Amino acid sequence: MSSISAAVGPMTPQLLDGNSLYRRVMITPSACGHNCLFLAHLGDWTWEAISTMSHTDIFREKNEDGDPVYPSAFYLRVCGSPAIQMHHFTFGDVIDVVTSVFNFGSQSLLVLHRVERAPEDGAPPRPVDPSEFHERRDENRLYVQLVNRWIARSRKTSNEELFKSAPERFATRHLPVLPDRYSPRLSYDLARRAETFHDVASPDYEPVVEEFAVDYTIDAARDLNGVGLVYFASFQSIVDSALLKLWRHLGRDVHSFINRVVRDRQAVILSNAEIDSDLRLILRSWRRRDDPRQEVFNVVIRHPARDRAVVVSTLQIQSEAPIHASV
Amino acid sequence: MSSISAAVGPMTPQLLDGNSLYRRVMITPSACGHNCLFLAHLGDWTWEAISTMSHTDIFREKNEDGDPVYPSAFYLRVCGSPAIQMHHFTFGDVIDVVTSVFNFGSQSLLVLHRVERAPEDGAPPRPVDPSEFHERRDENRLYVQLVNRWIARSRKTSNEELFKSAPERFATRHLPVLPDRYSPRLSYDLARRAETFHDVASPDYEPVVEEFAVDYTIDAARDLNGVGLVYFASFQSIVDSALLKLWRHLGRDVHSFINRVVRDRQAVILSNAEIDSDLRLILRSWRRRDDPRQEVFNVVIRHPARDRAVVVSTLQIQSEAPIHASV
C-alpha cells in the first residue's frame, strides 16, 4: 500500500507549547454550511485538546462507579466579525486552528480556539491567550471559547439529572490557570439567573420583540449524539432554527438570515433533555438606539413540564437592515 | 513543534489498488449518532475517492462557463444488518473503510464503500467489488453505494434547475466499468417513475399505511451545505424525521425507533430545493405477510407547488415489534 497525499482531511495536530495545539484543516462538506457542522468539528477539536492536555483517553474514561463520563460543553462563546463567520466557510477553505487549554477547576477545563484562513506565507501560528481574546481581538479571526465539564448519567436510560464526574486520572494542575478577570463564570452565573447574557437595563438598547415562542420536540432522528444525549451542536441548531422562525415572522427574508453577521454568540447549557422532550423556546430581542442594525436576540430553551431552562443563549447580530416593526 | 499521536482524526487514506482507497477512522462525536453525521462523513470520503481516482481537485473544479461544479449524490444505497448500523457507531469506535470507484458514464461515478469494525489482527483489507456487495454480503459489514453526478447551477441564486456538468479534466476511462448486471440504473429509473423502490405488486407484502403526510419547510439554519444547496445528508435526515413522526403516529415509542434495524435504504435525489421551499413528505408502508416485523417504508419528498418529486426513498426496516393497526 502506498500513501497518497490527502485531498481531504486534517493534518495531524501539533503541539505549540505545554497547553496549545495547532492544526491546519481543509474544510469538507461535513464541516461547513448554514448549520452547526463547523461547530461540531470544533467540538471534536476541543475534546482532542482536552484529551491531550489532561492526559485522558477521552472516549474511554469512566468514573469510580464504572460509568462512562464525557467532557460535556457547558458554556460556549463564539466571536466573529463581517470578515469571518462560522457559517460562511465553504468546500476547500483552508484554515488554521490554534487551541489552548486552561485549568478551570477540578471538573472542568476552559478551551480557547482561534480560527483564521491559512496565510499564504505559511508562518507557524502563535498560541492564543485570553488577553488576545478579551483585549486584542482580530477582525479576521474567529474566536471560540468553551467550558467543558465532565459529566455522567445518574440513570442509564435517562438524559436528565446528569452530574459532575471527572475521571480519576484527569490532570489539570500542570495547565495555566485562567486569570480571574477573564473567567466567564460570573457571566454565565448571571445568565443562568437572569435567563440572558444581555444587560436588559442598558440604556443603549431598546426592546423590539417582547416574547416570541416556538415549540420544539427533540428529534430522535437528528438531535442525538453517539451516546444518546442531545448533541451540544444540535442545541445550537435548535436555537438558530427558532431564530429563523422569528426572522420570518418579522417579515425578513431567508437571504438576509443567511447573510447575518453574528458578532457574539453565548450559550450556557444547563442540562440535557430526554430523547422525546417537548421543549419551548422563548425569544426576545433588542436593538441599539444609535444603530438599529445592531441587535441582540435572546433564546431560552425551556422544559415547560419541569419549569426550568435547559439552554440560555444570547446572540449579538449585525443585520443588513433593522427591524422596523415591534411585535 | 513536535508531532503528537492523534487521539482523534483519521489516518491518511492509502491506495489499495488502481481504484480503491482504504482508511482507518476513529469515530468522533461529529461523525456519529442518531442523525446523518456518519453519512455526511461518508460523503466526504466519497468525494475524496472521486478526487483521487478521477484526477480532479474536487473543491475547485469549474465547467466551461467558469461556474463551479460539484459531484452531487444522485443515488444512495446503504445496506446493514442487526450487527452493524450507521446510527449505532459511538465515540471512539475504530472502523476500517474501503472505498472503490467505478466508471459510470461521462458525468458520473459509482462509489462503493465497505465499513467494518477494525479487526484486532490489523490485517490489511481487500478492495470491495460489486459482486461482494450484490452476492456475498457480510452481516458484520455496512455497505454504502453512491452514484455521484457532476452538476452546476443554471442560475447563481437558485437551487432549481441544476444541470449535469463535468469538469473538462474529469478522467474515468482508466477506471473499471461496473458490470451491467450490478448497475443501479434500472432500479432508480423505475423508482423515479413509480416513486418507490418497492415492488408494490409483490404478493409477499401487504400494505399497512396507505398515506401519511408531513409538511416540511427547508430550514436555512440546518439544511444547507457550504455552497447553499440542500445538503444530501440533510435530505436523509428530513426523511428520517418524517419516519419518526409516522412511528409515533402509529403509537410506537422513540426507543423502538432508535433500535430499528435498517436492512436496506435506497434514495434517488432527483433535484435540489430552494432555501425556503415548502415541501411535503408522503409516506407509505408495507409489511411481510410471513414476518410482520419486516417492514418497508416509502418516503417521497415532494415539491407541491411544482408538482414533482424531489427525493424518492425506500427503507427496509426490521423492527422490534410489528405494526398492528392500519391507518
Image (tube, coloured by chain):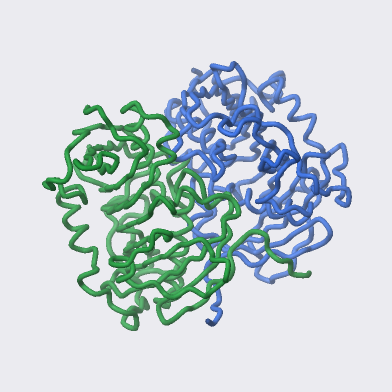
Chain colours: A blue, B green
Nearest the eye: B313 or B227: B313
B180 horizontally vs B16: left or right: left
Q: Residue A270, how many percent across, how many down?
A: 66, 29
| Image label count | 0
Look at the picture and state if B16 lies above or below B307.
Answer: below
A285 horizontally vs B211: left or right: right
Tell me where residue B296 sits by quadrant: top left
Nearest the eye: A209 or A25: A25
Look at the picture and state if B189 lies above or below B301.
Answer: below
Nearest the eye: A81 or A32: A32
Residue at the image point whose x is 69% and y is 43% from the top: A71
- Does residue A100 appear in this view? yes
Q: Residue B263, how many percent across, how many down?
A: 33, 51
Nearest the eye: B17 or B63: B17
Tell me where residue A185 sits by quadrant: top right
Q: Quadrant of the N terminus of chain B?
A: bottom right
Q: Quadrant of the C terminus of chain B?
A: top left
Look at the picture and state if A244 lies above or below A47.
Answer: above
B318 horizontally vs A14: left or right: left
Residue at the image point whose x is 29% and y is 52% from the top: B267
Look at the picture and state if B261 lies above or below B143.
Answer: above
Q: Residue B282, how many percent across, how many down?
A: 24, 37
Residue at the image point whose x is 41% and y is 65% from the top: B113
A157 horizontally vs A267: left or right: left
